[in-house]
Amino acid sequence: MSFRPSDRLTKLPPYLFAEFERKRAALEKQGKDIVNLGIGDPDQPPPRLLLETMKAHLRDEGVHQYSSSQGIEEFRSAVASFMKKRYGLALENREICLGIGSKELIAHMPLALTNPGDVVLCPEPGYPPYRSGTLFALSEPYVMPLRKERGFLPDLDSIPADVLKRAKILYVNYPNNPTGAVAPREFYAKCVEFAKAHGLLVVSDEAYAELYYGKPPCSFLELPGARDVGVAVHSMTKTFSMAGWRVAWVCGNAEVVEIIRGFKANCDSGQFMGFQKAVAKVLTKGTGDMKSIRAMYKRRRDLFVKGCRKLGWDVTSPEAGLYIWFEVPAKGLTSMQFAERALEAGVIMLPGSGFGQAAEGFMRVALTVTEDRIREAVKRLATLKL
């Protein structure tokens, strides 16, 4: 007997991150040293406060039973406190729902909120789950190209009227993965009016909101009327170097949050309550760690950018995030071809093509290795014959 994947799965391209991880593993098995600037997996440990608090709760009574999919009150109250302190937002617990990582929340949005044949507006380049979650829901992704000349902001006015008639969700993502662009308040204000005019839900992916190098970026929810038409998704993964722990939240429009909670109740059974208590402690008492994390990524960013500029490459410093997005520095090579050249030199970088057709011609570098390894990567890239 043989089995085949569903039609939904066959519509998806190979998940690029996983593809390069396989290539890396194969090369390392051959004894080759690879500097992995591909997947954005933080290399530093989580805050000590998180680890110690987690250990303290392991023997608590009552934390080992099933947890509510929406998150315990202690966790949601801590999120509300954090959002008030950081953004000045007054959120009630009913306007907050736990996520098992932002990926889970983003991928499930179309399943919870669209019907087959609806349209979801997806930025490109963009996080692959925007598109995959849409296809799993049997809805149709409509690509909004993010162009360098527009500051990597989508041109909402260029979306055809017949598309907008069927559109139900607008994904926006700032600070942006992979470009590092930050959205001005004026763009978010336009999103609010655009959503009201066309009956859309705005899903603002703000997973990188705390990794900034200058002025702190605002949240979509800070704009007047934003909570009437949208939600924001926040993640602990990059903020606190805890990718494997899988915790995030969606907040904003109470009706949408309740729909997500109801969907999740049929798909998961929450997160370990002891873990939620530890996260709550960090959100209320341990946000000071973010300053040193930002400083670390800034040093790495500056080191890579300066090193590449010495090679004659046109590389711009991102305002936020832990990625560097730059045009392929070799005429005549596709992003995949350049990525393969870099891999031969012992450096993994992700080709823009993995983030959609509109991203062809660009490369993404993740700043998730030490400064010494970044120096080594630049040294190896200098050997490329372009």
Image (cartoon, rainbow, N blue to C red):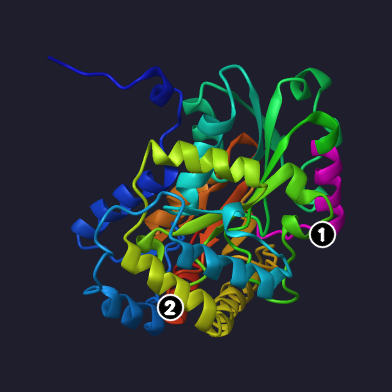
Q: Where does residue 169 sit, x and y in percent of width and height?
A: 67, 34
Task: Report whether 200 appears left or right of 286.
Answer: right
* Residue at left offset 53%, top offset 32%: 112
Q: Where does residue 95 sit, x and y in percent of width and height?
A: 61, 53
Splitting the image into 4 quarters, where does residue 31 fall? bottom left
Q: Which residue is mark 1?
A: 184
User: What predominant SS class does the magenta segment belong to?
Assistant: helix
Q: Nearer the viewer, mark 2 or mark 1?
A: 1
Residue 210 is at least partly visible in this image: no
* Residue at left offset 30%, top offset 48%: 22
Task: Report whether 203 appears left or right of 222.
Answer: left
Amino acid type at mark 1: Pro
Residue 48 lies in the magenta-colored region: no
Dot 1, how many residues are within 10 Å of its Cα: few (below 14), some (14-19), or many (20+)? some
With respect to residue 331, does 31 lie above or below?
below
Residue found at the far front of this picture: 62
Q: Which residue is mark 2?
A: 370
Query: Looking at the image, which is closer to me, 168 or 95?
Result: 95
With respect to residue 204, does 243 lie above or below?
below
Query: Looking at the image, which is closer to me, 52 or 296?
Result: 52
Splitting the image into 4 quarters, where does residue 96 fall? bottom right
Residue 185 lies in the magenta-colored region: yes
Q: Where does residue 280 sit, x and y in percent of width and height?
A: 46, 72
Query: Looking at the image, which is closer to me, 146 or 270?
Result: 270
Q: Earlier in the sequence, mark 2 or mark 1?
A: 1
Amino acid type at mark 2: Thr
The N terminus is located in which quarter? top left
Helix, strand or loop for disc 2 = loop
Specify the segment rendered in magenta. Answer: 179-195
Alpha-carbon span between mark 2 and mark 1 = 31 Å
Helix, strand or loop for disc 1 = loop
Splitting the image into 4 quarters, where does residue 52 fall? bottom left
